[in-house]
Structures are given as structure tokens and as C-alpha cells.
Image (spheres, rainbow, N blue to C red):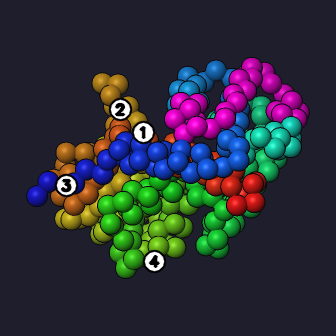
Amino acid sequence: MAATIIDGKALAAKTKENVRAEAEKLSRKPGLAVVLVGDDPASRVYVNGKKRDCEECGFYSEEYALPADTTQEALLALVTELNGREDIDGILVQLPLPKGLNEKEVLLSIDPSKDVDCFHPFNVGQLTIGEPVYQPCTPGGVMEMLREYHIDPAGKRCVVLGRSNIVGKPMGMLLLHANGTVVTCHSKTPDMAALAASADILVSAVGKTGLVTGDMVKEGAVVIDVAMNRNEAGKLCGDVCYEEAAARASYITPVPGGVGPMTRAMLMKNTLKAAKLHQGL
């Protein structure tokens, strides 16, 4: 039986429609400020996409495109100014920052109530103890996809490939909160292929084309491919050998059109939540 394709694009559109309907009930539009330092092409694509998402959801948005030689002091001063703005509910500093800027210090300077990316240590701590203010956008998007397709992690073996602060670690935490039994694999993990092949739910977030082959997928497993790579032909792909995995999986996410759209939709959902918090709702 061929795997059911988890349609992230359709779910993202549905999520944004719901967010727009909720936003229209508020006394003012939710506001998102996006700060882009330098001229990284990939970052520019992401920022443009976030601006379109804001328009679709009826949000107010501002973009601050700063030159690559912006000083740490100037960047911190901008964040401080945005922290004090009542019409700005979310602040997003696009990473990576140019060399010479201290990302950790910048992220720490963002008001946790406006940290809609969920990078601030306060929000990471809240996530860890099971009381998240916001869910990290990519792992949160994955959990929304599982719910939409009635896939319950409870009692399942969940294997996460990758341990980044942005995806791998919080992904494992959310699956654990959903009562999954979680194994996190990384570059020092022996027998990663065998662990992957034991997964009921397999999430790959490494960024290595062809990492997950068909023999690493358990028959009937749910396969979530978070990675966004380009193969030798320049075509977008994930970590998973899609055709091989789809022949064995029960559900699978495509690349593109899977997790990516849901990551952006979750940013809108977090910004809406921030606006409600700031309006005392």
C-alpha cells in the first residue's frame, strides 16, 4: 500500500485561514517585526515569504533590512525599541547573522513575550517543563500535522535524527509531552540506521541528502522529513529517499510542500497568540 502524503501546504492554508478569522476579532491587528541583517539570499526568500503570510492573515508587519556591517550596539538598540512598541507583538531576527554579531546576545535581548520563534531561554525552559508560551515553529508545525492526520505519538517509538536547538531538541520534547517514547540520534550515535528502522514515527532533521534510505524505514512507519536540501541536479529535496521510504511508510511528508509551509503558518499562529497575550485575552 502506498503511503498517504501529509499535505503541509493544504494544512498551512487552513491554519492561516483560522488565524485570520481569529485576528479579525481583535481590537487591533497583530504586529510582526522582521529584522534582516545583510543580504543572504536564502534569508531574503524567507523574509519575503513571512511578509506574504502576514498579508494573508491580516497582520501588520514591518521589515528592517540592515546592512551587513551593522554593529551589535545598533542591532540591540533596534530590538530594545521594538520591545517597547505596543503595536508590535512579535519580533523575528532572521538567522544566521553576519560574522561579528553575537546571535546569543541578540536573542536574549528580545522580550520573551515577543519571541514568536521560541528561541529565548525563558521560552525554551517553559517548553521543557511542559508549559510552553509558544511552540517552536518547525516542531510545532510537525505536531499540528500529526494531529491533523490523527497520528497519536502516545506509546509509539519516536526517533528524531538531529539535535539542533531549533528543531531536533524541541521536536523530541514535544513528542515526549505527547507521551511518545523518544530516541534522539546525532553524528555520534552508533547504529543510527537500526534505531531509525525501529521507529513508529521517524523525524529527520539533519540536512543531508539521501540520509534515510528505504531499509531505515519500518513497515507502516510515519516519516517526517524536516530537511530542505538541494541534490546534485539542484532540485529541492529532504534527508529521505522519498520513493524508497514511501513504499514502506504509512504516512510521509514531501519536500517541498510538507513541513516547510507549516513552519511559516506556525509563526503566524504564535504571533496571533502574542497579540492575544498583549491584549489581555
Q: Which residue is mark 3?
A: 3
Q: Tell me which label, 3 or 1, sits earlier in the chain.
A: 3
- Which quadrant is the C terminus positioned in? bottom right
Q: In the rendered view, tell whether residue 72 sits above or below residue 149.
A: above
CA–CA distance in space, label 1 to label 4? 28 Å
- Alpha-carbon neighbours of circle 4 within 10 Å: few (<14), some, or many (≥20)? some
Q: Please, what secondary structure does the residue beneath circle 1 have?
A: loop
66 magenta-colored: yes
- Alpha-carbon neighbours of circle 3 within 10 Å: few (<14), some, or many (≥20)? some
Is 234 on the left or on the right of 182, as rendered? left
The image quadrant of residue 224 is bottom left
Where residue 146 appears, as percent x and y from the top left, is: 38, 61
Q: Residue 118: in sight, yes or no?
A: no
CA–CA distance in space, label 4 to label 2? 33 Å
- Name the front one of labels 3 and 2: 3
- Residue drawn at (74%, 20%) of the image: 67
- Name the front one of labels 3 and 1: 3
Where residue 2 appears, as percent x and y from the top left, is: 14, 54
In the rendered structure, which segment of residues is drawn in magenta?
50-79
Residue kind at label 1, given as amino acid type: Met
- Residue drawn at (47%, 65%) of the image: 184
The image quadrant of residue 124 is bottom right
Q: Tell me which label, 2 or 1, sits earlier in the chain.
A: 1
The answer to whether the residue labelled 3 contacts the one labelled 2, judged by CB atoms less than 8 Å apart, is no
88 magenta-colored: no
CA–CA distance in space, label 3 to label 4? 24 Å
The image quadrant of residue 257 is top left
- Alpha-carbon neighbours of circle 2 within 10 Å: few (<14), some, or many (≥20)? some
